Image (cartoon, rainbow, N blue to C red):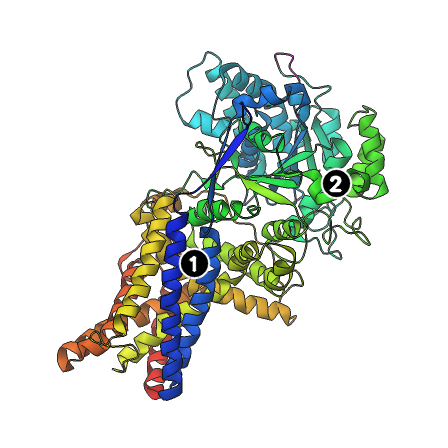
Amino acid sequence: MLEAPLNTRKPSPERWFNRAYTLVYTAAIFALVYRHCYNLVYHPSFTTIFLLLADVVLALVWATWQAYLLNPIQRKVFPENLTKVVKESDYPGLDVVVCTADPFREPPVRVINTALSVMAYEYPTEKLSVYVSDDGGSQLTLFAFMEAAKFAKHWLPYCRKYDIMDRSPEVYFGSDSFFFPEAYQIKVMYETMKAKIEKVVDSGTVSPDLITDERWLKALDKWTPTFTPQNHPAVVEVLLESNEDKDITDHPLPNLIYVSREKNKSVHHNFKGGALNSVIRVSATLTDAPIFLVLDCDMYSNNPKTALYTLCHFLDPKVDPNLALVQFPQCFHDINKVDTYGAEHLPEIRTIPMGMDGICGTMFIGSGGFFKRQALLGSPASIGPSDIKQAKTHCLGNKSMKSDDILAVAHRVAGCQYEENTKWGLEMGFRYGSLVEDIYTSFRLQCQGWTSVFCDPERPSFLGNSPMALSDLLLQSKRWFVGFLEMVTSKHNPITYGFKYMNPIHALCYAHYNFRPFWAIPIVIYAFLPQLALLNSYSIFPKVSDTWFPLYAFLFLGAYGKSLFEFLVAGGTFVKWRNSTRMWLALGCSSYPFSMVDWVLKSLGLSTIEFNVTSKVLDDELKKRYEAGLFEFGVESPLFLTISIAAVVNLLAFLMGTIQVLKNGGFEELFAQLFIAGFGVINSWPIYEAMLLRSDKGKMPMMTTLKALGVASVVYFVSSLAF
């Protein structure tokens, strides 16, 4: 063992409990399926068929979840030992890609804060390059970064001088904890820059009077009247070059490059995956760092040592040569105390990556992932088409990134037709074929033999924003689930392809994500079938005194009890877990089934799935309601309608069922259904509140409420005919 290790790993102490629980619960599931099959043979009914279907789907998705729990591991890094293993001058180059797409839904001020936070990394500046991938092709975003380039000359040396931890200016100056001599002056500079950018964004255009640099003024000339987000030429602008630009202390600044790939309505642009592939090629042309980091525009750096944590894995003398990815958790800074929407995703950011790390490696989750460039481009001898090789030769010749021949190649590789008749998106770069290009790409890489690790330091490395409006969260989730379904039906799916080319347990981890949309089947069945049967005084579960009843009680309590245990182990609280399970049920009646419908329509060629950017714009009133723990409805949405229908049916069933039991008896026979309906009522309380008790702008639209009541009445009438 090394005297000065760069990282360590140890198995999670919960793994043996997880394994024992899995064995016991599996036996209970088989007993339940046996009972369903027995009833189907000897007492056939449509309720038995639906319950069997629901429980089989639940069992299959549950089985894939257990793959994460078999061998979770915990890692620790020791960046203080790096200099004992490698000289700082030998650190590899690092390219950072900050992704944005819409200046009105992703405010440029927020994007530049993310960029500035990584430009201020504790890393050799001559080896650090930050690329802004603007897939909206906005002059507003470019202008913001022109201003950020000037501010960086003051901000970076300030952070370095006083060892500032919060290196996002917005976060630092918003904390009221700054007290160094230059702080007030730099804050004024930041507020002036911020106001200037916001004024330009509000106006929708950049006035030439605001630009003093001739080269930057020439860059903005590309925004002609025919320039649109969907139809424009490639734009590659070097805003800072380390070899030439210095800060106020005469220290080199990191490279800062703006990239907007060419767009043409006649060429499919492949969403975020296409934008990333474009900037991978451009960065190979200009800086060609062996490691690059992908960040969403709102995920600012919360720890300036993060790059060093990454090197603790990539530079470990005992590292697996096939290590392709170091993934950090995606944490959020603006979630309220009770996590109303379950948006913290604790199982996704802790349980899942730790579990996959103990098998063959975690997955890329769209942001916070440090890649080895070679993993996406192949070996250095076959890195890509000839013009990228030519550009690499220019870089080795120490030519300026601003030279005409280098920039000509950069613009060419950012062209919309560049990928035609190449392996980009198929065998190189981020893979196309799914809206979840992040997970799909990591799956494909690991099928090729590449590995990954999960790095989770005590201080979160990145902090981002979560949706405060329920509609944003549901639409974002629906888009993800459509992407998972695209993976299921692709040639490279986790079952047929994954079992062939990777560890079967590892393949099950990916399969779990792909199967999540199918949760719609059991959730919808259990949201309606027991309740409608209850409304018609029809028992579909064993009565309390039946010998089979303890099995049902164990399955329910065991599932929710284990879920709570895992949530607490991951660092959550009971209240947050309750809200997370409530959102799981809400997703099951909205995003899950709607994603299946969208996927079917797309497969039949009847619709086209568009990539909708989740809004990062903050509304003060919305924020106050969110901080108060209120659900944000406020707009008409079919996703709200289905949730509301389920809530009304559960309330109606619980009230009428209780009256029937009090009046006619039969509590033992109908207890399970009363319990399920009551469980639904408790979890639907925010919906009833939004329908009946609230008067603010976030209440349920009256039309949605009326539609829900009408549809629920029709459902009740139809059920009375069926039962």
Q: According to the image, label 1 marks what residue?
A: 635
Label 2: few (<14), some (14–19) or many (≥20) C-alpha neighbours in 10 Å: many
| Residue ID at (44%, 31%) | 459
Looking at this view, is 93 or 586 the one in front?
93
Compute the Cα span from label 2 to label 1: 41 Å
Where in the figure is residue 473, as x and y percent of width and height?
46, 53
Q: Is residue 170 above or below residue 189?
A: below
Report the number of numbered marks. 2
Label 1: few (<14), some (14–19) or many (≥20) C-alpha neighbours in 10 Å: some
| Residue ID at (27%, 82%) | 538
Looking at this view, is 211 or 86 the one in front?
86
Tell me, yes or no, whether the two marked residues, 2 and 1, touch with CB atoms within 8 Å: no
- Mark 1 falls on what kind of element? loop
What span is colored magenta in the figure?
248-254
First in sequence: mark 2 vs mark 1: 2
For the stretch drawn in magenta, the main secondary structure is loop
Looking at this view, is 433 or 549 the one in front?
549
Q: According to the image, label 2 marks what residue?
A: 281
Q: Is residue 370 left or right of residue 166?
A: right
